[in-house]
Amino acid sequence: MAKLSGTAIIVFVLFAFLAEQSVAGRYYDDKVEDKVRKEVKNAIEKNPGIGAALVRLVFHDCWVNGCDGSVLLDKTPTDGFNTEKKAVNNIGLDGFGVIDAIKDKVKNDNVSCADIIVLAGRDAASILSGGKITYPITRGRLDGVSSSAAEADRALPTSDFDFDQLKTNFDSGFRKFTVEELVVLSGAHSIGVAHLSSYADRLTSAATPDFQIDSSYRAALNATTPPALLKQGQNPRVPNNVRDETQAFQQQAEYDPVAMGVNPTKGVLDNSYYHNTLENKVLFKSDWVLRTDGEAAGKLVEYRDKPEEWNKDFAAAMAKLSGLPAQGKNFEVRKNCRVINNHY
């Protein structure tokens, strides 16, 4: 996930904090949730980009074997160091230090690492949306004791999926998500960053037809992150959202957020993704292919035109995602989120 920096987002985030915190200095009556919120707030103040990473962490934990905190493990008896963190599809995963800091704050409250992930992701979404996206979280998740990079790569959708692959992935096994929920959750790409390796296939006409990506946007990407960098061992990151790019990049990409009806404030979690997708100014093939299905394309237009509806539906989809049941048999409440208890 990219660092969504800049004065604008810092001012926006601080305003959201001040508007939401009570006179008593608490965000929630529940003491655990209040501790989590304050740590997330502090982390985003120091590094605005970490908020997007925390939202992403929910998906990458819960999608593999349910919400079990397995994405946090550095080592397990069964998989050694080849845990989910090492998965190809988890490139750039971040936010682990924030989870550690929260765990330290709630160490006497018997809170699982799995619960911390979903609470932190919920609070990051709330902060980055200016309080427009919020949803209740019920605690009680337990932490898994296994974590496999291979399992993560099998379970997580990739940026080059076509629509049928996405649809199958979202409605398989214990994951039962509709096409609408697929489109809703894709809106999280309004924040964060992507590595060149995830979109390099979109930068040449030979690999991606011109009608699938705006030519000016592609030219700007080729100028800043040419695919040849990968052969030199470099894999730079760019913002998922062209709105969060520099002014020079936006000019080359012929992108004017105000003219498109997009809030120009960088780093905001909002419906700008749908504006960009319908203009073919998105990084991933897996984003563009939503235009190839009738139902999905209709939802793109709907969420572009109805931001309040997207806020509500995104909150509901994140709540459902955060409730995916952990798969397996052996669970615990970890003392340290990075290792299972008998290796602590």
Image: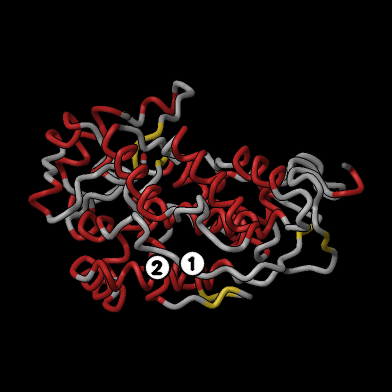
**Secondary element at image label 2:** helix
**Secondary element at image label 1:** helix
Q: Is residue 24 above or below residue 218?
A: below
**In this image, 304 relative to 151: left or right?**
left
- Amino acid at dot 1: Met
Q: Residue at x 17, y 37 (%)?
A: 250
Q: Residue furthest right?
A: 342
Q: Estimate how packed mark 2 is, as few (under 14), some (14 to 19) or many (20 or more) residues with alpha carbons within 10 Å.
A: many
- Near-viewer residue (46 or 22): 22
Residue 314 appears in which quarter of the rendering? Answer: bottom left
The spot of residue 200 in percent (x, y) is 36, 39
- Near-viewer residue (20 or 254): 20
Q: Residue at x 54, y 68 (%)?
A: 321
The spot of residue 266 in percent (x, y) is 28, 42
**In this image, 201 relative to 111: left or right?**
left
The residue beneath circle 1 is 318
Q: Quadrant of the C terminus?
A: top right
The spot of residue 107 in percent (x, y) is 76, 48
Disc 1 and disc 2: Cα gap in Å? 6 Å
Query: Contact (CB < 8 A) between labels 1 and 2?
Result: yes
The residue beneath circle 2 is 314
Residue 182 appears in which quarter of the rendering? Answer: bottom left
Q: Is residue 196 above or below residue 342?
A: above
Q: How many marks?
A: 2
Residue 94 appears in which quarter of the rendering? Answer: top right
The spot of residue 81 in percent (x, y) is 77, 39
Q: Is residue 106 above or below residue 174?
A: above
Q: Residue furthest left?
A: 259
Q: Residue at x 79, y 51 (%)?
A: 108
- Amino acid at dot 2: Phe
